[in-house]
Image (cartoon, rainbow, N blue to C red):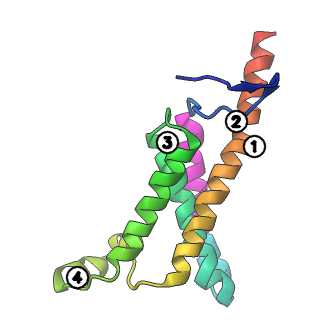
């Protein structure tokens, strides 16, 4: 269901993009590497340590869900990504021995996190919003211009 909505003969962004999985897979991996490098190279700076990694994690989640749900609207993907991120953060309030043992494993600990922090919710919102805006303002117009060029 790939359609362009027209209002007063002005084209609006495509709200139901058929996303390129290769592009979104690459964006997910690039965001993952950027998050890792931000902590590794600039982890001594409090702002980066406390906030940037969480925003990049949420951005990676947005791109990952955009990869999975390639025909859903940007708004739906953003809502799913934000819901997932918030659910993970809320799950950090739960500290049974079995889940804390899982969190000790490096990869699972990165996904589940360790402790609930209110500011993380803001960071997640910013990361998902950045992903949605990037898709609407940069990725979709580029895709549409390439599609129009191919038709000529």
Report the residue marked by disc 2: 140
| Location of residue 114 by image quarter | bottom left
From mark 3 to mark 2, how far is it between C-alphas? Answer: 14 Å
Q: Are marks 1 and 2 in contact (CB under 8 Å)?
A: yes
- For this view, does 28 lie left or right of residue 113? right
Q: Earlier in the sequence, mark 4 or mark 3?
A: 3
Q: Which of the two marks, 4 or 1, is nearer to us in this view?
A: 1
Compared to residue 1, the image places residue 82 above or below, namely: below
> Does dot 3 land on a helix, a strand or a loop?
helix
Question: In the depicted view, which residue is nearer to us: 146 or 107?
Answer: 146
Q: Read off the magenta span.
A: 20-35
Place of residue 149 in the rendered image (x, y in percent of width and height, measured from the top left):
80, 18
Report the residue marked by disc 4: 101
Q: Main secondary structure of the magenta part?
A: helix
Report the residue marked by disc 1: 138
From mark 4 to mark 1, how far is it between C-alphas? Answer: 42 Å
| Mark 3 crowdedness (10 Å alpha carbons): few <14, some 14-19, many ≥20 | many
Compared to residue 14, the image places residue 66 above or below, namely: below
């Amino acid at each position: 269901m790939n359609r362009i909505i027209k209002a007063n003969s002005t084209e609006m962004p495509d709200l139901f993009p058929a996303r390129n999985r290769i592009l979104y897979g690459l964006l997910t991996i690039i965001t993952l590497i950027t998050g890792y490098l931000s902590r590794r190279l600039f982890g001594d700076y409090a702002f980066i340590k406390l906030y940037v990694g969480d925003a990049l994690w949420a951005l990676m989640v947005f791109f990952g869900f955009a990869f999975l749900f390639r025909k859903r609207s940007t708004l739906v993907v953003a809502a799913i990504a934000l819901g997932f991120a918030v659910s993970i953060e809320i799950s950090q309030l739960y500290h049974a021995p079995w889940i804390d043992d899982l969190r000790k494993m490096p990869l699972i600990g990165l996904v589940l996190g360790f402790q609930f922090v209110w500011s993380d919710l803001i960071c997640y919102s910013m990361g998902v919003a950045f992903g949605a805006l990037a898709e609407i303002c940069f990725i979709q117009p580029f895709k549409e211009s390439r599609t129009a060029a191919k038709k000529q």
